Amino acid sequence: MNNQQDFDCLGIGLGPFNLSIAALIEESKTQLRTRFLERKPSFSWHPGLLLSDAKMQTSFLKDLVSAVDPTSPYSFLNYLVKQRKFYPFCASGQSVISRLEFSDYLAWTAHQLPNTQFDCNIQHVDYVDDQFIVHSETECYTSKDLIIGTGMQPHIPECIHDLISDQCFHASELALRAPDLTGKRIAIIGGGQTGADIFQHTFDQQFGKPEHIEWISRRPNIEQLDEGCFTDQYFMPDYVNQFYHLDQKNKHREVSHQKLASDGVTSDCLNGLYQRLYHDKYVLRNPKWWSIKPHQSLISSQYRNGEYQLDIQHGLTQQVATIKADVVILCTGFTHDLPACLEHLKPLMITDQHNRLVLSSDYCLQWKGMQNNRIYIVNSGTHNHGIAEPQLSLAAWRAAKIVNSLSQKTIYELAEEQNILDWGLDIEPQHSFASASSM
Ligand SMILES: Cc1cc2nc3c(=O)[nH]c(=O)nc-3n(C[C@H](O)[C@H](O)[C@H](O)COP(=O)(O)OP(=O)(O)OC[C@H]3O[C@@H](n4cnc5c(N)ncnc54)[C@H](O)[C@@H]3O)c2cc1C
């Protein structure tokens, strides 16, 4: 250890969610000594899925700061101006921007903030004498409070776990691996946005021309993201505030109903895909080199005779078929596991009957030391704050809530206006600045 540094609050992980908090703290001019620690050498946003033509699911107005501080220098609009592309951007008429451009905006912000640090992989955190001791490989920091923003982990289904290799991997690694798919049989497992993006880029031969592409989805069809204006009401502060106070049974029911509000494929992506398929099949009349199979679940897998053999079961007929592939790309989602660096604190955490973390309305973890030291967690699952939690839509609002709570005063006015619908649920008292006493 070559260094010890003391902070009021340390952030662990620097994806968009902690970045939003870092940007708001910096602009708020609080006296809080903060730093946000990121293990990567420089900012990147899901680099393995930063495919050339992949688009955002959310408006660029839902950036790191604008919803709560539109005059912040860290807004997307300021990025456009500073990068000298405001007018060309306006002329492009885009309502949905590419992930590449949003990622560039995030990196532009991350690297100008004074409270960020890269190349800092946090290995473990101890709690001693009312403070956190945060260890990276080379440094040691102490802090009164923590904000955990380490994101989600790739989910690999049990039935293919043992076959993970250079030719069978999670989609989150695709662009980093940049595999040569020329002449190969490709199986894409998973029918959400990532599955659609990967199918499209494979179809477009971004990684070479495959011999055949098979896209398998458990869902009954290739399902569109519900982007309706009433659906959007779920991604507004007053819904989240009211959702928070529901009991677990009702929360579960609500989130289950809302699956396609967050997990479908954008209409923009689906339309583009459908038109490509139509052109390939009915205009060019190419021999069949792709197939899309909804209602099919991967149930077991083997690697035999130099190929992957994947058993898939039909959701309606229960019939099992085997498909063969040279490369398997798993678009099977992400899980919300507690990061390994918090293992030492785990016994101190209070969990619900499903062993999940319990958070206050302002994102404070309920744990044994919370009277004196707070641990905020963003993106920890939908069971506390609902469907907006893993999405960018309310990232700035949540960040402002956390900054207010951290500084124990209203730095950011949160205009939590009623939305169009009257949800009829109890609204939490405003500005509770929850610590242990307001849980
Ligand atoms: C491909 C993709 C596209 C998406 N597009 C959209 C979209 O258009 N709209 C939308 O609303 N949502 C979108 N989402 C969902 C969500 O907005 C993103 O997943 C978002 O990146 C979540 O941010 P995060 O800060 O929680 O985590 P992440 O972005 O995953 O960042 C976590 C960071 O923590 C770092 N870290 C982890 N452990 C440690 C450690 N021990 N020490 C130091 N650093 C650590 C990681 O290196 C990483 O940089 C998308 C998700 C994916 C996967």
Image: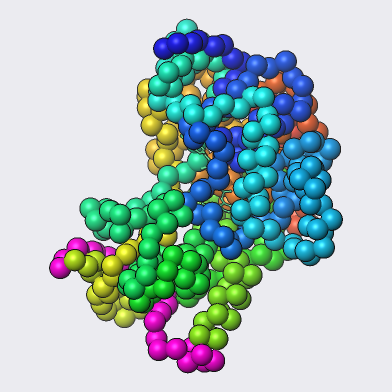
Q: Residue furthest left?
A: 305
Residue at 59% x, 14% y is 7
- List x then y, in percent, for residue 93: 79, 65
Is the residue 195 above or below the residue 418 in the image? below
Is the residue 354 above or below the residue 371 in the image? below
Query: Splitting the image into 4 quarters, where does residue 313 fall?
Result: bottom left
- List x then y, in percent, for residue 338: 42, 35
Viewer can see residue 234: no
Residue at 50% x, 15% y is 141
Q: Residue furthest top?
A: 129
Residue at 77% x, 26% y is 28
From the image, which quarter does the C terminus lie in? Answer: top right
Tell me, yes or no, whether the highlighted magenta stretch contains residue 171.
no
- List x then y, in percent, for residue 400: 71, 34
Viewer can see residue 182: yes
- For the record, the magenta segment spans 281-305
